[in-house]
Amino acid sequence: VRIDGSPMPGGGYVTTFQDITAMRRTEQALKETNIYLEQRVKERTQELQVINEQMLKAKSVAEQANQSKPRFLASASHDLLQPLNAARLFTSALAGKATDSEMKDLVNHIDSSLGAAEEIISTLLDISKLDAGVIKPDIAPFAVSELLENLAMEFRQIAGAEQLQLDFIPCSALVRSDIQLLARILRNLLTNAIRYTPKGRVLLGCRRHRQSLSIEVWDTGVGIASDKLEEIFQEFKRGAR
């Protein structure tokens, strides 16, 4: 109960009584709620600190694993390339001694399989070097025709062996890039174009866009489904032939 009193002008004293039970209960409830909230904030803060520590540990483990990946890939790829190179030398010698066509075809198939394995391992080695920051782009100006004409000549024979026609559109533009890394990219595109084109043709050429230039590889193959386009940037992802 709250009691208020005040004197009257003509004498006497006025006293009022008010039941404030509900107000006190509300104040107590607010106080208890505040204590509860403070406790929950403290608990949540401790939980977040634990989670943050766990995330930092996980990040450290992931970074260590990521740092060891390029070294492992570089070491493994280098060791695997040596016996593959030796095996290809043996198949080359065997091809020179093969007399009948059936034996020659078998040797050629073995050499082709070894070449594919060597290409995959070389790609792994390049990826490990890129991850480790060993490969640095050597940017310099060069004529696009210098690169594309050699690629067209190289892959025209490969395409012909697959009963495909490879067309090349000459280009007189000058660009600034790393010619070796660009050649590797285009070789991968041309290889995939031939691999995934059962019949028809492959086209290599350029397209000007004001101050820039796009080098494009087109083919009449199976293409890539629209819902799979993002997957082309994932390592070792391969579509159905």
Image (tube, helix red, strand yellow):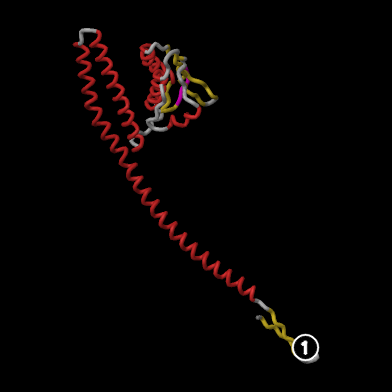
- Residue 140: % across, % down: 41, 28
Q: Amino acid at mark 1?
A: Met
Magenta segment includes 136: no
Task: Look at mark 1 in the image and give the residue it sits on.
Answer: 8
Badge 1 element = loop
Which quarter of the figure has residue 232? top left
Q: Nearer the viewer, residue 227 or 61?
A: 227
Q: Residues within 10 Å of mark 1 (few under 14, many from 20)?
A: few
Image height check: is 183 above or below 131?
Answer: above
Q: Position of residue 37 (x, y in %)?
A: 52, 64
Q: Is residue 127 above or below residue 163?
A: below
Q: Nearer the viewer, residue 32 or 51?
A: 32
Residue 68 visible at all: yes
Residue extent of the magenta highlight:
171-175
Residue at point 22%, 7% (across, down): 100
Q: Is residue 107 left or right of residue 234?
A: left
